[in-house]
Image: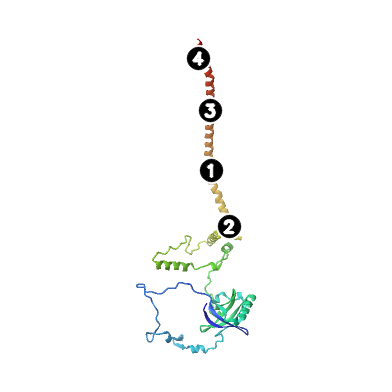
Amino acid sequence: MRSIWNGAISFGLVSIPVKLMNATENHSVSFRQIHTEDGGRVRYRKVCELEEREVTSAEIGKGYEDPDGSVIPITDEDLAALPLPTAKTIEIVAFVPAGGVDPMQMDTAYYLSANGVPATKPYTLLREALKRSEKVAIARYALRGRERLGMLRVVDDVIAMHALLWPDEIREPDGVAPDTQVKVRDAELDLADALMDTLGEVDVSTLHDDYRAALEELLTAKAEGTSPAAPATDADSGGGKVIDLVSALEKSVRAAKTARDDGAMAEVTPLERGGRKRAASSSASSSGRAKTTPKDVGGKKSTAKKATGAAAKKTTAARKSTSKTASTAKANTSTAAKKTPAKKAATKNRARA
């Protein structure tokens, strides 16, 4: 990891030589401006508006423009002469609780590495002191020609520094909040709480940029001369319009619960107050529908039972008929058997005569 600044952390009378490195990197896909007709690059050239000619980087300096439009030239020597005690030092000015820093002030993040073996001991001392106190250090430092405010904290076994905006750089949220007075009902709050509980927590390390992945697939497909895959559409998208807030919340809770159940996650927290009443009403309504359906189906079952009973009667009748036929056949056979000896006796008498 390449360092972008070398200096020292000033911790009272202790000086800790450190190297500063970027802790983040930008993975966004960048584009170039091109001429749409022939694909040629469109570039910006630095032109002096007085001489109307392109100038090189060596000819370019700094200047401050007054409100009246006049420009005051400022040289690097002028800036170097300014008193800047933090030019090569990260000067710790205070230790505050971790929650004492407004997240609105957070800016770029850096890693601080001990610069050399002698710096290892004081670096470790500061790191362990921050860990045990559960505090962060507020510091001043200079980078890229200006003094900045920073916050030092421990990340794993490394001291990290977040650049902070100065308090006067944070705008007041005047006119941002809704200017219409709205009353939120307990039922709506209960459903919102249930939705929050159902969604639960997330491991931030598992999140990724879906848009960037889709954009990379698009670029790969275009480079290979193939058609990109059709994007998935959300059939339930309502265009961002919420007609019934309670219905939207209930639908969101059900959707979140289904998603979590599919992943063997926890159940939804029972709703309170109005939410319980609404849920009970919804359950009663569902139960009523469930009871209505069996009645309809029950009519069909009754018809089926009648048909089954008729079939059973026919079967019984058929069995009785078969049994009666068999009995008649047996009786006929017995009669025939009795008549046979009589016929034989009559034949014998005729023969004797």
Q: How did the renderer colour the structure?
A: rainbow
The residue under the point 40% across, 67% down is 224
Which amino acid type is marked by label 1?
Answer: Lys
Residue receiving disc 2: 279
Q: Which of pointers 1 and 3 indicates the residue nearer the eye?
A: 3
Badge 3 element: helix
Q: Secondary structure at mark 4?
A: helix
The dot on residue 347 is 4
Q: Mark 4 and mark 1: span between their CA atoms?
A: 68 Å
User: Would you name the residue on which mark 1 appears?
Assistant: 301
Q: Please report the residue visible at 53 percent of the width from the left and 34 percent of the height from the top.
A: 315
Label 3 close to label 2 by CB (< 8 Å): no
| Residue 326 disc label | 3
Marks 1 and 3, Cα distance to the nearest angstrom? Answer: 37 Å
Q: Amino acid at mark 2?
A: Ala
Outermost residue toward the right in this view:
132
Quarter of the image holding residue 278? bottom right
Q: Earlier in the sequence, mark 4 or mark 2?
A: 2
